[in-house]
Structures are given as C-alpha cells and as structure tokens.
Amino acid sequence: MDRVFTTCLIRYLKRLTRIPTIFLPLQCQQTLCNNPMWKVVSSRLVKAIVIEESMAWLSTLGGGYSSLGDQSDYAASLAGTVSLFQMSLALEINSPILLAKSQLWFAQSLMQMGFLKNSAMILRRMYVIWKPLMRPDLPSDMRIDHMALGLWARLRHLWKKKRTQKIFQQN
C-alpha cells in the first residue's frame, strides 16, 4: 500500500507543476513567491490536499475490503489495517469526526473477524465519548450516531447467531 500511495503522491505532485491550482495576477505571484510565509502556506496547502486525497483512496479501499470481510478474514483484516491508516491521518489533520468514523470502521472489521467483545468495547467507548458531544443539528454528528447504532444492531445479531450455533451444536 505504501508503494501505491507514493506513486499517487508523485503523480499528483507532477500534475501540480503543470496545472496552476491557484489563479493569481502575475504581480501577486511574484510578491507571494518571494515571501517566506507563502512557502509555509503553500506547503501546508499541498499537505492538506494530499491528506484529503489519501483519505478518499483509503475510504474506497476500506469499503471494498469491508464488503468482502464477511466472507474472508483476510479482507476483514485488511479493512482493519486501512481504518488504522485512516485513524493516523485523522490525528494528523486533527479531525475528531474522521477519527470517530475510523474507529467505528475498525470495530466493524473486528466484528467481521469474530472479535465481538473487543468490538463491543470500542462501540461502548465511542458511545460514552460521543453521546454528550452530539448535536442533532449537525449532520456529521448524527451520521456517527447512526453508524454506531447500526454497528451495535449488527453486533447484537452476531451474538444471537453465535448463541444459536452453540445451542445447535450441543443438541
């Protein structure tokens, strides 16, 4: 995955040199390019763009592996790894909403691998942390609430399924 990310990053940076992303009058460009603060701003801008694009790639990969995770433990483990990468990027950009979502995705991958108790611990912790902070007027907060409720319902279903399998095996 590092090779894929590096290739995409290099391809993106090469495009930046050919296609201007910010359109400014020529005199402003000359003034800004000579300003040392502009170098700081432009480097932070490029970093933010690269992180945003990385999150998009990781979300696509994680969703694909997660959809296969019900049939394959390997795919579920890859989905968990992708969600850990997303957590590190969320910490990098200091986004509590993305951090919460990636923790929920990690809990889902644990469910798919059969680690139901660990998944339940993460879901409970997320509920304790997020429930007091949630505002019904913010769609992003409500999305986290709905994600957690959906995962909790799935966890209850898996527990029931596991209990019925034990009962069936005993008979």
Image (tube, rainbow, N blue to C red):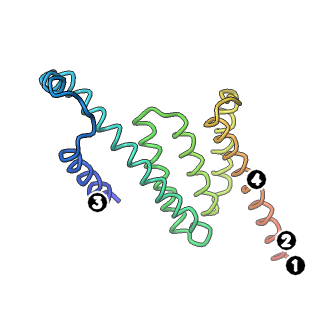
The residue under the point 73% across, 57% down is 154
Relative to 40, is 145 on the left or the right?
right
* Proximity of marks 3 and 1: CB atoms separated by less than 8 Å: no
Q: Residues within 10 Å of mark 4 (few under 14, many from 20)?
A: few
Lower position in the chain sequence, tag 4 or tag 2: 4
Quarter holding the N terminus? bottom left
Front position in the image: 25 or 105: 25
- The image shows residue 90, relative to residue 77, as above or below, that is above
Measured Cα–Cα span from mark 1 to mark 4? 27 Å
**Amino acid at pointer 1:** Asn
The residue at the point 17 percent across, 27 percent down is 29
Left or right for 41, reference 142: left
Q: Which residue in the structure is indicated by mark 4?
A: 153
**Closer to the observer: label 4 or label 2?**
4
Name the residue beneath numbered marker 1: 171
Q: Earlier in the sequence, mark 3 or mark 1?
A: 3
Please report whichever mark, 1 or 4, sits nearer to the chain's N-terminal start. 4
Question: Residue 56 or 166: which is nearer the viewer?
Answer: 56
SS for callout 3: helix
SS class of the residue under badge 4?
Answer: helix
Q: Amino acid at mark 3?
A: Arg
Q: Which residue is mark 2?
A: 167
Identity, as a three-letter code, of the amino acid under mark 4: Ala
Q: Give the alpha-carbon distance from disc 4 to disc 3, as whole Å.
A: 37 Å
Residue at the image point whose x is 69% and y is 40% from the top: 145
Residue 3 marker: 3
**How far is disc 4 from disc 2 in space, using C-alphas?**
21 Å
Going from N to C along the chain, the mark reached first, 3 or 2, is 3
Estimate the x, y position of residue 148 in percent, counting from the top left: 68, 45
Q: Earlier in the sequence, mark 4 or mark 3?
A: 3
